[in-house]
Image: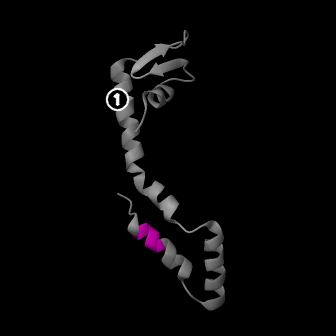
Amino acid sequence: MVTIAEALNSLCDNPQFVVRDTEIEWHSTDITQPTDAQIDAEVIRLQAIYDANAYARSRATAYPSLQDQADMQFHDAVDGTTTWQDAIQAVKDANPKP
């Protein structure tokens, strides 16, 4: 879930603020505080980006470790197999891009 703080940081360059629940205490005197509508729109935009990349987060945790992948690649080269390619393809198939 994208937060108000993330939206404010996305909208402004180095803003100074405190968020308590949904109330914003603005401390940046040289930056105009975004409107509630601007903040809401930015939360929605950032959440859409986050949601669209769910497959990438799922893939990242499902891939074998880099050490295991290197071992698979070594054995594939020696044995003429496709273990590494098969393992990577299985992760991609289980977590397709939208």
Taking depth in this image into account, of 97 and 27 the one nearest to the observer is: 27
Q: How crowded is mark 1: few (under 14 residues within 10 Å), some or many (20 or more)?
A: few
Residue extending farthest bottom: 79
Picture quadrant of residue 83? bottom right
Along the horizontal axis of the image, is 29 left or right of 95?
right
Counting labels gives 1
Whole-percent x, y for residue 36 in the image = 35, 19
Q: Residue at x 34, y 29 (%)?
A: 41
At numbered mark 1, what does the secondary structure look like: helix, strand or loop?
A: helix
Whole-percent x, y for residue 28 in the image = 54, 13
Picture quadrant of residue 1? top left
Residue extending farthest front: 21
Whole-percent x, y for residue 53 in the image = 42, 51
Picture quadrant of residue 14? top right
Rendered-image quadrant of the C terminus: bottom left
* Colour scheme employed for the rendering of this structure: one colour
Q: Residue at x 55, y 18 (%)?
A: 16
Q: Which residue is drawn at 39% across and 22% down?
A: 22
Type of secondary structure dominating the magenta stretch: helix
At label 1, the amino acid type is: Ala
Along the horizontal axis of the image, is 72 left or right of 36?
right
Residue named by callout 1: 41
Q: Considering only vertical position in the picture, is 61 above or below 40?
A: below
The span picked out in magenta is 89-93
Q: Considering only vertical position in the picture, is 2 above or below 39?
A: below
Q: Considering only vertical position in the picture, is 96 above or below 24?
A: below
- Queried whether the magenta region covers residue 34, the answer comes back as no
Q: Considering only vertical position in the picture, is 97 above or below 78?
A: above
